[in-house]
Image (spheres, rainbow, N blue to C red):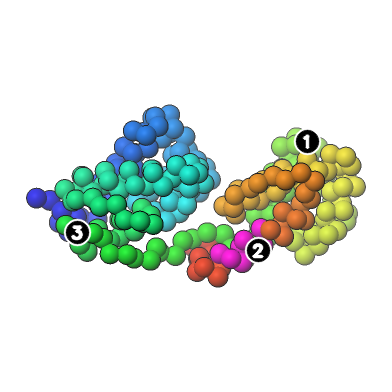
Amino acid sequence: MTTLTTLTQADFDIALLESTDDAIRGLFSQEVLDAFHANLLTKRSIKPEEIPRELPTVSLVLRKYFGPSAETIERAIAQKLYSKCNIEFRKVENYQLIDYVKGVRGKPNGEAPRLEPDKVSLPLQDDFDPFFLESVKEAIQEAVGEQRAKLVFHFLERDVPLDKLSRHLPSFYEALRKNFGKDSGVIETAIAKKLYEKLVIEFVETPNTGLGKYVETAFVKLAQREQEGFVNIATY
């Protein structure tokens, strides 16, 4: 009988990748699987063949992309992986995919021991400045077009140097309102959405909420990540 202890790392990666694809395709469709791969590539620069090596981040994206269904998907992936490796699968309460995958090598014919997930490379507070500037530029360009955006940036820089944007946030918020008038709320929400997407934070739009409040909330969530032991994405 083949077990995970007799598989090479390459064989194991192939089995895990096939299990991931089979589970998502089986629960949904090939179209959904293709869309998930596209999301990983465009949002996180993870190619399908890199999924086994980026499993902690992939697991987070699963939860963001599929919401409450992610738990079912991860269990289905684990079941298929165990089946491919001829190992009995046992559901363990509060286990995530990484727990099943990490534990299975050490005890191939029994219940996997509880292991702490690896530290995940995600944006932290040090990553805020470049992501915020990118979000501002992308949101404004999409709203007004690339040519007009150049003029907008020119006027904004009269009030706030864009390369020092995060140090002058109150002045920047005021400059947005001065340049966009009654449309500033739409622009601020668009910036917030892009920022949260880059920071891998769930975005929940609330009425009459300015960009400042969204930024404040983002900082709180980034601080919580650091306390939980996440790894700064800029170090990788």
Label 1 CA crowd tier, 10 Å (few <14, some 14–19, many 20+):
few
From which residue to which does the magenta span run? 218-225
Locate residue 132, reporting x and y percent.
Answer: 69, 54
Q: Residue at x 23, y 50 (%)?
A: 89
Q: In the image, is residue 55 above or below residue 119? A: above
Amino acid type at mark 2:
Val
- Residue that lies at the very extreme toward the left in this rendered image: 1
Q: Earlier in the sequence, mark 2 or mark 1?
A: 1
Q: Earlier in the sequence, mark 1 or mark 3?
A: 3
* Residue 151 shown left or right of residue 190 in the figure: right
CA distance for labels 2 and 1: 31 Å
Q: Which residue is mark 1?
A: 144
Q: Do we see residue 189 in this rendering?
A: yes
* Residue 142 shown left or right of residue 160 in the figure: left
Q: Which numbered circle lies on residue 118?
A: none
Eye-nearest disc, 2 or 1: 2
Locate residue 216, reporting x and y percent.
Answer: 72, 60
Q: Which residue is mark 3?
A: 110
